[in-house]
Image (cartoon, rainbow, N blue to C red):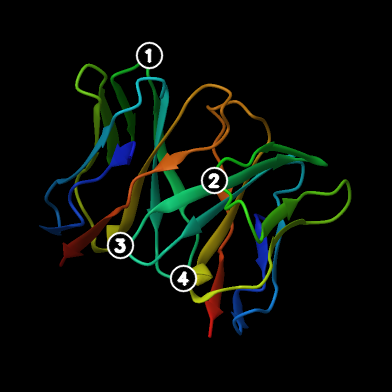
Amino acid sequence: NAGVMQNPRHLVRRRGQEARLRCSPVKGHSHVYWYRQLPEEGLKFMVYLQKENIIDESGMPKERFSAEFPKEGPSILRIQQVVRGDSAAYFCASSPRQDSTDTQYFGPGTRLTVL
Amino acid sequence: DQQVKQNSPSLSVQEGRISILNCDYTNSMFDYFLWYKKYPAEGPTFLISISSIKDKNEDGRFTVFLNKSAKHLSLHIVPSQPGDSAVYFCAASSTNAGKSTFGDGTTLTVKP
């Protein structure tokens, strides 16, 4: 009974490179959320996806960031032309439904370091 | 504009005593509140939740209290144990919104 899987756990990129973060939700969960945690801060919502649909991307920066959750395979958070300010822990969470009473189950996170 | 605030960055208590972690929110549309516990290098783990139709929810050593008029909730841990030492995040959401809004966390240290 696997929980939310994220890989890689650690990712180092140089400025200007691309970062791809992957998230496999709990089996049977069709709702995925991405959050970002900067040092000494809480988790900030980025994007909420269902299979093949972006439901809410109000927390996503307008440029360089994109997310997808294809019909098959993991959800991907993609950051193009990374800058040092993108260094953070990125957490993915999944839930079976949109209902606010559903607990979101979090993955272990991907720690992105931009040199 | 931070909609969920945890004003105490840290809290230290003695083993066996009560830990009280506080959280305030500003958005009156929030109707579901959660507490998560987080260890270093791990993702947050769900601890306990409360719906806005209740004012108290209890689960073992953990109790969450909600004061809607004050837009305030608190997490009580009693008795506190050294293994409770972690960062505790308060989160809030509104029906069908999906996403949760998190506070910045309170680091709890329980001393043996």
- Residues behind callouts 3 and 4 on a single chain: yes
Q: Is residue A68 visible?
A: yes
- Residues behind callouts 1 and 2 on a single chain: no
Secondary structure under badge 2?
A: loop
Q: Looking at the rendering, in which quadrant would you find the N terminus of chain B? A: top left
Q: CA distance from mark 1 to mark 4?
A: 35 Å
Q: Is residue A23 left or right of residue B74?
A: right
Secondary structure under badge 1?
A: loop
Subunit bearing disc 1? B
Residue identified by numbered label 4: B41
The earlier-in-sequence mark between 1 and 3 is 1
Q: Position of residue A114 (x, y in %)?
A: 54, 80
Q: Look at label 4 and name its amino acid.
A: Ala
Work out whether B67 lies above or below B75.
Answer: above
Q: Look at label 3 and name its amino acid.
A: Gly
Q: Position of residue A1 (x, y in %)?
A: 70, 53
- Residues behind callouts 1 and 3 on a single chain: yes
Subunit bearing disc 3? B
The earlier-in-sequence mark between 3 and 4 is 4
Q: Is residue B70 left or right of residue B96?
A: left
The tag on residue B83 is 3
Question: Residue drawn 37% across and 67% down?
Answer: A39
Subunit bearing disc 4? B
Pointer 2 local density, CA inside 10 Å: few below 14, some 14–19, many at least 20: some
Number of callouts in the render?
4
Q: Residue A17: name its quadrant.
A: bottom right
Which residue sits furthest front? A63
The tag on residue A59 is 2
Camera-side mark, 3 or 4: 4
Q: CA distance from mark 1 to mark 3?
A: 31 Å
Question: Residue drawn 46% across and 54% down?
Answer: B44
Residue identified by numbered label 1: B53
